[in-house]
Image (cartoon, rainbow, N blue to C red):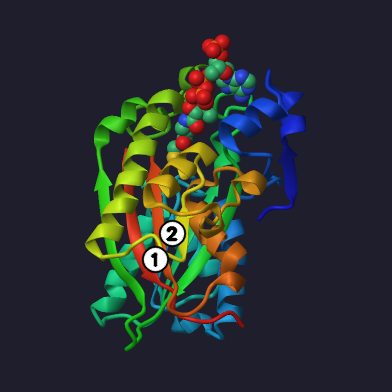
Amino acid sequence: MPDYVLTNEELSTMVDTNDEWITTRTGVKERRILKGEGKGTSDMAMIAVNELLAKTNTKPEEVDLIICATVTPDHVFPATANLIAAKTNCVNAFNYDIGAACSGFIYALSTGATFIESGRYKKVIVVGADKMSSIIDYTDRTTCIIFGDAAGAVMLEPTTEPLGIIDFIHKSDGKGVDYLRMKAGGSKYPATHETVENREHYVYQDGKTVFKFAVVNMADYAEKIMKRNNLSSDDVAWLVPHQANKRIVDATSNRMGLTDDKVMMNIERYGNTTSATIPTLLWDYENQLKKGDNLVLAAFGGGFTWGAIYVKWAYDPK
Ligand SMILES: CC(C)(COP(=O)(O)OP(=O)(O)OC[C@H]1O[C@@H](n2cnc3c(N)ncnc32)[C@H](O)[C@@H]1OP(=O)(O)O)[C@@H](O)C(=O)NCCC(=O)NCCS
């Protein structure tokens, strides 16, 4: 988490908004912003990966693969995962990025798990990292109140116990481009003076439409993954939901029949950090997790992209 705290109060001095509106409509009180010239997503991710290596007693050269979910890569290319590997001395890893907006981390997690399951690799690091402040228009009150910057990382390893990533369902629908996108800066509309003047290098969001799709799909797919794994609400220890908006999370947990004490939340302190919400929730709540706990991870994001993962947590808190 970057140090700089951007509060609702400070935002109220930048755009026509107020703490009460932001809190009731989104659940966000403050978010972190990465400050400093030349600092990018990989700088936050590097810290997360270094902490992960230390905590798991892993030598950097043992890492086989780093997958980084991000929509705010340091550069269009090379991949941010390559830069993270270089900064953390993971010299034997091959690395690539996944761009699936707010579902990026769950897409990357199941991809990483599949590499482990294949038996080909033993240590896969999955990173979710975004410097959303680099693509947010701080004159647009409908988006700047939501997003923040952060990075998180997890290590995947093989086990002979029936633990880990048990099941996943992922979906996408490209018609979402009309409702949530950054229009310019890609191959269709490369950067020009005009694209900059028109503020097309920032997130555009039709909040109402995104909200409707998110509420239905996150809840539907969280429920689907429970049903197909015969999990009742009593069986689920935790919902680990992408932190888009507290109201979207509430709709999902209600559908799953879960009480609030089983729902991980940190939107109040960090806002929507896109690819980083789920790994930073796991970091925040790690001490409360027990080996064998059933977790449902659920996300919805730009694309549209969405889905859910069933994880059986693999270790007790230290
Ligand atoms: C963006 C979002 C918070 C807006 O909330 P909403 O309840 O849909 O609000 P609306 O867009 O209907 O706006 C209601 C009113 O508040 C105003 N408003 C919008 N942003 C505001 C702000 N920051 N402060 C104060 N008022 C604001 C609007 O102009 C509108 O005023 P009007 O009724 O006079 O036209 C909500 O739509 C949302 O969370 N969408 C999904 C976002 C998301 O999840 N994105 C990431 C994808 S993973």
SS of the residue at dot 1?
strand
Residue appearing at x 39%, y 53% in the figure:
298
Residue 112 x/y as whole percent: 34, 68
Q: Pick the quarter of the image with the N terminus.
A: bottom right
Numbered disc in front, either 1 or 2: 2
Residue 145 versus residue 268 in the image, above or below = above
Label located before the other in sequence (1 or 2): 2
**Location of residue 10 in the rendering, given as x and y in whole percent from the top left corner:** 76, 31
Q: Quadrant of the C terminus?
A: bottom right
Q: Image quarter for residue 30?
A: top right
- The answer to the question of whether label 1 and label 2 lie on touching residues, with beta carbons closer than 8 A, is yes
x and y, in percent, of residue 15 in the image: 68, 21
Is 98 situated left or right of 259 in this image? left
- SS at badge 2: strand
Which percent across, then down, holds residue 91? 46, 76
The residue that disc 1 covers is 95
Q: Which sits in the foreground, 18 or 100? A: 18
